[in-house]
Image: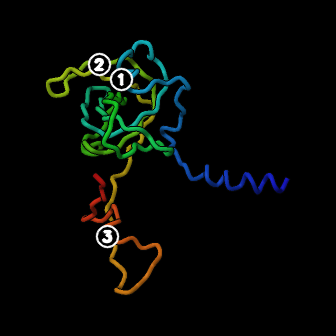
């Protein structure tokens, strides 16, 4: 019995580290479609529960609801949108009530949970785009990332956890090494 507890303790601690926000913690359906499948055939997937996220591209307030245009990004284990240069497309998050566009501004990350409700054709520039529409039941607006400047250690100091500025992605002069 003690061996079993000692074996399960690290697993429990690791699972406790992943914290999905309470507003979006409702799990998606097992057969929930991806964004591309929902955009292709929205009527087939109508009513499926999903959890999607991405970067806000625009906010449009209506009398009783708000349409939030989101550039889709894959979610990590905490349901936060990953920072990637790829996207499967865009979707419309229909949030009941008023959402302040000064807070839900372009470029902020958001995760939504809700049901698919068909699709809407709208313009992206000159292109007619088919947006899957999500009736939002819960959403989480992620805080803006804060860049923190660290003073380098004194000359001659050796700290095994210190990362020099050229290897620190939060440093303003950081340039990732690329091999061509």
Q: Which mark is residue 35?
A: none
Give neighbour class at mark 3: few <14, some 14-19, many 20+ (Cα, 10 Å).
Answer: some
Q: Is residue 114 left or right of residue 120?
A: right
Q: Is residue 150 above or below residue 12?
A: below
Asked whether the residues under the numbered discs 3 and 1 touch, taking CB atoms below 8 Å apart as contact, a structural biologist would say no
The residue lying toward the viewer, choosing from 83 and 111, is 83
Measured as percent of width and height from the top left, residue 117 is found at 40, 19
Q: Is residue 33 above or below residue 75?
A: above
Mark-to-mark CA distance, 2 and 1: 7 Å
Which type of secondary structure does the marked residue at label 2 adopt? strand
Measured as percent of width and height from the top left, residue 49 is found at 49, 25
> Which label's residue is closer to the chain start, 2 or 1?
2
Which residue corresponds to the image point at 52% horizontal and 38% vertical from the top-left?
25
Mark-to-mark CA distance, 3 and 1: 43 Å
Check the image and tell me how it is coloured.
rainbow
Give neighbour class at mark 2: few <14, some 14-19, many 20+ (Cα, 10 Å).
Answer: some
Measured as percent of width and height from the top left, residue 95 is found at 36, 30
Q: Which residue is mark 1?
A: 133
> Which label's residue is closer to the chain start, 3 or 1?
1
Which type of secondary structure does the marked residue at label 1 adopt? strand
Tag in front: 3 or 1? 3
- In the rendered image, which quarter is residue 122 located in? top left
The residue lying toward the viewer, choosing from 159 and 115, is 159
Which residue corresponds to the image point at 52% horizontal and 30% vertical from the top-left?
28
Q: Is residue 17 above or below residue 84?
A: below
Q: Which residue is mark 2?
A: 120
Asked whether the residues under the numbered discs 2 and 1 touch, taking CB atoms below 8 Å apart as contact, a structural biologist would say yes
Mark-to-mark CA distance, 2 and 3: 46 Å
Measured as percent of width and height from the top left, residue 60 is found at 24, 31
Q: Which residue is mark 3?
A: 165
């Amino acid at each position: 019995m003690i061996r079993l507890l000692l074996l399960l303790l690290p697993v429990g601690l690791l699972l406790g580290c992943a914290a999905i926000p309470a507003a979006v913690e409702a799990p998606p359906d097992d057969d929930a479609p991806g964004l591309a499948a929902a955009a292709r055939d929205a009527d087939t997937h109508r009513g499926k529960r999903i959890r999607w996220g991405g970067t806000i591209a625009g906010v449009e307030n209506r009398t009783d609801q708000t349409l939030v245009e989101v550039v889709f990004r894959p979610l990590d284990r905490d349901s936060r949108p990953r920072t990637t240069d790829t996207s499967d497309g865009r979707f419309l998050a229909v949030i009941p009530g008023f959402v302040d566009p000064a807070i839900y501004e372009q470029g902020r990350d958001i995760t939504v949970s809700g049901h698919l409700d068909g699709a809407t054709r709208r313009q992206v520039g000159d292109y007619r785009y088919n947006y899957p529409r999500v009736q939002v039941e819960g959403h989480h607006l992620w805080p803006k990332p804060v860049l923190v400047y660290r003073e380098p250690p004194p000359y001659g100091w050796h700290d095994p956890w210190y990362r020099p500025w050229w290897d620190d992605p939060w440093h303003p002069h950081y340039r990732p090494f690329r091999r061509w």
